[in-house]
Image: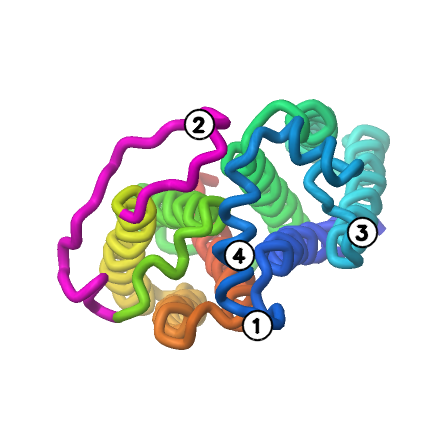
């Protein structure tokens, strides 16, 4: 019962993160009638003070589309299931023989995100709200994946010497991917995805003119092309670094007894993710490809967490 509940909650957390990306990208106007002009229009709107936007729409940035309503309902159900996971973890802690710490952290994280969402919507700019909610969703997915892995039947243990050798490198890969996911959210929330429409060059150069300064004020002015380019370029540089490191890690992991399959899965997801990123640039950020780019990032994260779990100290 507990394992099934955790697995369902984990799948729902994955769906919530992907739905959040879908709702956010739909809100950005991807696929609208006058694409890509509507993308630029929404970028200008989101630079307005949040209070002004709320006053004009009457609903706070107009998040009343069916995508946002569906996302809201999924998040509410996720909150209920997270509370159920936490409650069962405490009730059956002796039978489970596991600390209820992680399920308790999960409930606390859900409560924080709920309070933050209510407060921040009228006080903080879109990029900050997006990044905090994205980080929260990713943290929930990691917690639930780890809780589920503790309950699943364990395969043969990895050799202790190999585990010690690769443990730190695996967690470095997770950290690198987390940074890259946050950079992707930063690109999305600042509408910087289309500032570079070529690959591998950006605006015809490897190092185009860039401005790495950034302000969170509510001036209502759009970001300069140089600032948008810097945001986009950092995500590209992070993608290249992640590709090289995680590609190397997965190929080396494949040679470790008991980790061949997980190494292949990570390598396949890395290649797919990189291809989707290139497709986003070359084809003008189609909605389906952009959402798949987010979904595969979450699958890759879960795969790396599973690798970290296999290499943990026992």
Mark found first going from the N terminus, 3 or 1: 3
Question: Residue 201: within the magenta?
Answer: yes
Q: Nearer the viewer, residue 251 or 247?
A: 247
- The residue wearing badge 4 is 298
C-alpha separation, residue under disc 3 versus residue under disc 4: 22 Å
Which residue carries the number 3 mark? Answer: 69
Name the residue at 73% across, 31% down. 55
Q: Nearer the viewer, mark 2 or mark 3?
A: 2
- Secondary element at image label 4: helix
- In-front residue for pair 270/310: 270
Percent coordinates x, y for residue 184 in the rendering: 43, 51
Label located before the other in sequence (2 or 4): 2
Q: Secondary structure at mark 1?
A: helix
Q: x, y percentage for residue 289?
A: 51, 72
Residue 103 in sight here: no
Residue 210 is one of the magenta-drawn residues: yes
Disc 2 to disc 3, how far (Cα)?
Answer: 28 Å
User: Of callouts 2 and 3, which one flags the residue occurring earlier in the amino acid sequence?
Assistant: 3
In the drawing, does residue 245 fall left or right of residue 126?
A: left
1 and 2 marks in contact (CB < 8 Å): no
Magenta-drawn segment: 199-225
* Dot label at residue 216: 2
Residue at 82% from the left image edge and 35% from the top image edge: 83
Q: Nearer the viewer, mark 2 or mark 4?
A: 2
Mark 2 surroundings: few (<14), some (14-19) or many (≥20) residues within 10 A: few
Q: Give the mark, 1 or 4, whose residue is nearer the N terminus.
A: 1
Q: Nearer the viewer, residue 69 or 57?
A: 57
Inter-mark Cα distance, 1 to 4? 16 Å
């Amino acid at each position: 019962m507990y394992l099934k509940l955790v697995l369902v909650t984990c799948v729902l957390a994955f769906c919530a993160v992907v739905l959040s990306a879908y709702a956010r990208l739909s809100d950005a106007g991807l696929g609208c009638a006058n694409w890509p002009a509507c993308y630029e229009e929404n970028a200008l709107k989101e630079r307005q003070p949040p209070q002004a936007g709320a006053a004009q729409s009457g609903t706070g940035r107009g998040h009343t589309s069916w995508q946002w309503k569906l996302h809201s309902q999924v998040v509410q159900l996720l909150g209920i299931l997270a509370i159920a996971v936490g409650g069962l973890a405490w009730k059956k802690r002796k039978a489970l023989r596991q600390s209820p710490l992680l399920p308790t952290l999960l409930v606390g994280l859900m409560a924080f995100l709920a309070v933050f969402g209510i407060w921040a919507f009228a006080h903080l700019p879109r990029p900050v709200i997006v990044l905090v909610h994205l980080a929260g969703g990713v943290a929930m997915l990691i917690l639930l994946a780890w809780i589920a892995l503790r309950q699943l039947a364990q395969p043969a243990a990895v050799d202790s010497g190999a585990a010690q050798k690769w443990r730190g490198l695996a967690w470095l890969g997770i950290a690198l991917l987390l940074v890259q996911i946050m950079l992707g959210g930063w690109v999305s929330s600042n509408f910087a995805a289309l500032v570079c429409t070529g690959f591998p060059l950006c605006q015809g150069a490897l190092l185009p003119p860039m401005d790495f300064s950034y302000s969170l004020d509510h001036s209502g002015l759009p970001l300069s092309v140089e600032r948008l380019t810097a945001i986009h370029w950092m995500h590209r540089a992070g993608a290249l670094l992640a590709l090289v490191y995680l590609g190397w890690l997965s190929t080396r992991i494949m040679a470790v007894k008991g980790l061949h399959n997980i190494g292949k899965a990570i390598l396949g997801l890395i290649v797919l993710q990189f291809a989707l990123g290139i497709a986003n640039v070359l084809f003008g950020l189609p909605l389906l490809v952009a959402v798949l780019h987010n979904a595969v990032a979450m699958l890759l994260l879960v795969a790396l967490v599973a690798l970290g779990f296999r290499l943990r100290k026992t």
